[in-house]
Amino acid sequence: MKIQVSSLLCKLNFKKIGIYFCYISVLMTLSYFAFFYGLGNKTLHIWDESRYAVNAYEVSHNGKFLTPTYDGQIDMWNTKPPLLIGCQVICIKVFGNNETSIRLPSAFAATFTVLILFFVVASLTKSKPLGFLVAGIFLTTPGLLPYHALRQADFEAFLLFFSAAYSLMFLYYIETKKTRTLYIAMALFTLAFLSKSSASLFFLPGIGIYILIRKQLLHFLKSKHFYFSLLIPVVLLSSYYLGRELLNPGYIKAVYFNEFGGRAFSALEGHAKPFLFYYTFLSDYALGFWYMLIPAGLVLTFFEKNKFVKNLFVFSLILAVSHLLLISISKTKLEWYCFPEVPFWALLSGISIYQVACLILRWIKNTKVKEIILIVVFAGILYYPSVSQWKLVKFLSVEETWQKNVKLFLRDRVNVLITDKTKEIIVITDNYDQNARYYIYKLIDQGYNIKQGSFGDLKANTFVILDMPDNNKMIEAYTFCAKVDTVEIYTETVKAFYIGKFYNNEESLRYVENFIVNNEEFKNYIKEKADNNGVTFEQQLYSDANYLIENAKMKLGISL
């Protein structure tokens, strides 16, 4: 046994391991600051992120991993497979129910993308500096950090990682013919499909084109391993969808409309954009300045002696362009639909810079010296973008002003303003209610008696939190019928009140009469009305007070 261990240690190249460790340490450090720093500082965004958080919270309590729920009902709005939701549930179980737990799976997926870019490029091209540069470019691509991107609890990070991973593994198999990479590629494709279903298919045409260009189609058709490996997605995906259909009849039909035919042939939810929408978004903002040297790389690729560098460039170009064309043809367009192709634009940018640098350094014959110079140059190239990315991360870790709404009030103010957890709290919103629902669940976990409801749910000794303009003056109506205290005016639309003891008829009358008398404008109106009606001020006051009370009762649907 000692001889075997000694033999194994002798085979290990500690110098090579040390070099890889240095590269990985730098990339992991940059990944921490890009994807993990301040991850839970901001409240969850309205729309998708909040909804997925509600899905994950409910599944963590009801255990329905195959049929995620929203408000206790199977969610047929979000028909994506539940891989992301399941990972979020695990994080909730391990780290607690908070924003960081909900977003952690996305941050890990982003970090794994950095690592797979480095390892695949370094292994395939035998150039660790190139692998480092490509991973660094991906890390510092500005469009990947803001809304609906790699720091958010959305499907995009999982889709991006697994799509890039399966595509690169297919390339690795094509170039090396190592059978295990084909099985890994099929397994990764299955996970990509379980991340965001149909969106994972958009790289397959590009892979098919590359196979034809490399004249590898016959090899695939004759390979038994291709058919055996194909069983991985066929068996697993058909099992999931058929099983889900048995548990949730109508699911497959909903999937077709939401994820296949519907989005491709019509602009869902008003998301119609021109054909060049994605090109403009990528070139003007998302990719930063990295893509500018790609034309130079395109020319230099014809003279590239390293066939793996050349093939990697061609493969990345085909996948990036074909994906861009497919999503541009689709009728429904949203910025984040182009994110999965960013790793391939990073590959194209990195290879282009690498080729220009190698052209400049062609007079250096010593491979080790050239590698040292390249890594120094590439580290210098990445320095400013890394600093800019760090500034962007710090900016994105602060709550935006427009996000200051009911969710922020529920997270930061309720436990300060309301210390008596036995009192019922009703949250009334006309907004997209998932914006509040997740934070209501968090308060329930803290022991609060809180729920979403309507004005009809209000009763004595109840707190009410409004997330809507009170155009019908419902709270004013309650003041005529009960003792109402203002807890806090948070924004123009977010306000909190306490509905205390309901008045009897005499108390209501006394309150409303005092309300009128203490309002100079209202008081003068009653005087003028009394003169016009030929009655005393007291008589008119009594009549109008009763009218206001009865009107308030009718509006509130209560009887005293």
Image (cartoon, rainbow, N blue to C red):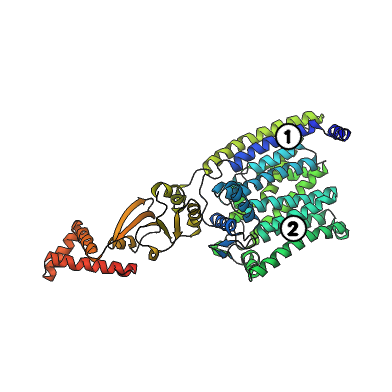
Considering the image in quadrants, where does the N terminus appear?
top right
Mark 1 / mark 2, whichever is N-terminal: 1
Q: Is residue 525 visible?
A: yes
Q: Mark 1 Cα within 10 Å, few/some/many (few <14, many 20+)?
A: few
In depth, the one of 124 and 443 nearer the eye is: 443
Residue 235, picture quadrant: bottom right
Q: In this view, does 321 lie to the left or right of 439?
A: right
The mark found on residue 473 in the picture is none
Residue at left 66%, top 32%? 380
The mark found on residue 204 in the picture is 2
Provide residue 441's location: percent of width, then percent of height: 50, 55
Q: In this view, does 320 lie to the left or right of 177?
A: left
- Do residues under tags 1 and 2 come within 8 Å of each other at their CB atoms? no
Q: In the structure shown, which secondary structural element does the residue marked by tag 1 occupy?
A: helix
Q: Is 348 placed above or below 386 here?
A: below
Residue at left 57%, top 57%? 61
Three-letter residue code for mark 1: Phe
Q: Mark 1 points at which residue?
A: 21
Three-letter residue code for mark 2: Leu
Residue at left 48%, top 46%? 399
